[in-house]
Image: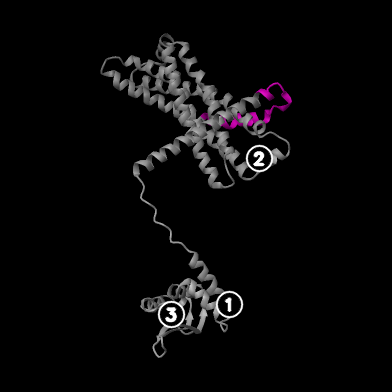
């Protein structure tokens, strides 16, 4: 295999350029160096001899186009009757492609402040559309519930019970353990701070107020957002990716009635019960610390809770549980329906469901706290 070459023949008048050998990718580096000095010595009147050209590929053809010019290379190939048809077609194709190639303009350097504002605007627009979809999905869920509640034959009792077990019963250990430990921590902190004021007895009130009004329902809702909303998204998202939801619609069934409604109702049943359990576990954890550190017996602890803490504080906390449950379940199901046909999309929307659920729960809890404060509850 002879290495390609391009040489000026000074014996002719005017000097002609003789192209010979193999112009292939194997000899690309050598050919590129050899033709670098020839470009400045050639003009449009220089005769070109391609009769000695051997093997040719696109790499060699691009070098010839760079040396002779894309348009001229195509004309030479067309005018040479002895050139093989394959080489002629390759030279003409490469010449045409390089003649039409336009060097991309360098991207102008943007303003950093404008780019930052654009990104913020795009994020705000995304959040706006996301909330519009959420409100629409909430309306669709309520419409489906109103349509089926008076038709007992269309109730999915088995699915509802299964989801109650999954979202409620299976979550009892983690909810009870977490709230028990948080109750103990709150009691430790209260006893440490109030000790300097000689008011350690109010540690009981601190634990009771915090768990009955806030911590019980909030911690449970956050756990359910991370545990159950992600499960709902992954389950429905996997069905969406496997086209099972399309199959459900093809069978004449309603995915909202079949998949969403049982999950939402299961959360509405499970979260209030788990909230009550969390309140009890938090009080037990705080009572245990009070008994061990402050010498407040369990009987005295219960008497203080009974005398200082009204039932309305318990009702205030429990009233938030159904709202949190509904929002968490709806967000988890909605993100599942947004999944496209890939495993990566399932992971992205599962993460989005958890983040959205926790954010909305904390936002609603803050708004509820402000409302209760203004109402004097």
Rendering coords of residue 261 (x, y %): 63, 29
Q: According to the image, label 2 marks what residue?
A: 245
Disc 3 from disc 2: Cα separation: 71 Å
In the image, taking residue 74 as reference, residue 42 lies left or right, namely: left
Q: Which residue is drawn at 33% across and 21% down?
A: 190
Q: Look at the image and say whether residue 255 sits in the magenta stretch.
A: no
Q: According to the image, label 1 marks what residue?
A: 86
Q: Is residue 86 above or below residue 9?
A: above
What secondary structure is marked by label 1? helix
Q: Look at the image and say whether residue 159 sits in the magenta stretch.
A: yes
Q: Residue at x 45, y 29 (%)?
A: 178
Q: Are marks 3 and 2 in contact (CB under 8 Å)?
A: no
Rendering coords of residue 179 (x, y %): 44, 26
Quadrant where the C terminus is found in the figure: top left
Q: According to the image, label 3 marks what residue?
A: 45
Q: Nearer the viewer, mark 1 or mark 2?
A: 1
The magenta span reads 146-172
Q: Is residue 212 above or below residue 53?
A: above
Residue lying at the far top in this picture: please name it. 307
Rendering coords of residue 301 (x, y %): 40, 14
Q: Do the residues labelled 1 and 2 touch (CB within 8 Å)?
A: no
Give residue 165's quadrant in the image.
Answer: top right
What secondary structure is marked by label 2? helix
Residue lying at the far bottom in this picture: please name it. 11
| Disc 3: CA contacts within 10 A as few (<14), some (14-19) or many (>=20) | few
| Disc 2: CA contacts within 10 A as few (<14), some (14-19) or many (>=20) | many
Q: Are marks 3 and 1 in contact (CB under 8 Å)?
A: no
């Amino acid at each position: 295999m002879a290495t390609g070459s391009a040489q000026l023949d000074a014996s002719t008048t005017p000097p002609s350029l003789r192209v010979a050998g193999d112009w292939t990718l194997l000899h690309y580096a050598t050919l590129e160096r050899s033709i670098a000095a020839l470009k400045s010595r050639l003009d449009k009147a220089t005769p070109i001899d391609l009769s000695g050209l051997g093997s040719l590929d696109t790499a060699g053809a691009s070098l010839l186009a760079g040396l002779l010019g894309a348009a001229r290379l195509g004309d030479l190939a067309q005018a040479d009757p002895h050139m093989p048809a394959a080489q002629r077609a390759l030279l003409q194709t490469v010449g045409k492609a390089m003649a039409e190639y336009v060097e991309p303009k360098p991207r102008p350097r943007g303003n950093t402040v404008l780019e930052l504002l654009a990104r913020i605007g795009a994020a705000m627009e995304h959040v706006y559309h996301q909330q519009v979809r959420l409100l629409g999905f909430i309306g669709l869920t309520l419409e489906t519930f109103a349509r089926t509640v008076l038709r007992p034959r269309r109730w999915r009792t088995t699915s509802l019970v299964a989801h109650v077990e999954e979202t409620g019963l299976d979550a009892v250990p983690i909810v009870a353990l977490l709230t028990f430990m948080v109750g103990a921590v709150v009691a430790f902190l209260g006893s440490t701070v109030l000790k300097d004021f000689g008011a350690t007895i109010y540690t009981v009130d601190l634990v009771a107020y915090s768990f009955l009004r806030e911590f019980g329902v909030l911690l449970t809702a956050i756990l359910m957002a991370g545990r159950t909303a992600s499960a709902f998204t992954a389950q429905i998202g996997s069905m969406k990716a496997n086209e099972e939801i399309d199959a459900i619609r093809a069978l004449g069934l309603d995915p909202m009635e079949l998949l969403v409604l049982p999950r939402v109702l299961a959360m509405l049943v499970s979260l209030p019960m788990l909230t009550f359990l969390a309140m009890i576990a938090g009080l037990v954890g705080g009572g245990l610390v009070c008994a061990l550190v402050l010498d407040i017996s369990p009987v005295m602890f219960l008497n203080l809770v009974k005398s200082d803490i009204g039932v309305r504080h318990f009702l205030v906390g429990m009233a938030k549980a159904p709202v949190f449950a509904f929002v968490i379940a709806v967000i988890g199901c909605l993100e599942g329906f947004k999944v496209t046909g890939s495993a990566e999309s399932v992971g992205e929307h599962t993460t989005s469901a958890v983040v959205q659920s926790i954010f909305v729960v904390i936002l609603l809890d803050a708004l509820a706290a402000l409302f209760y404060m203004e109402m004097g509850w």
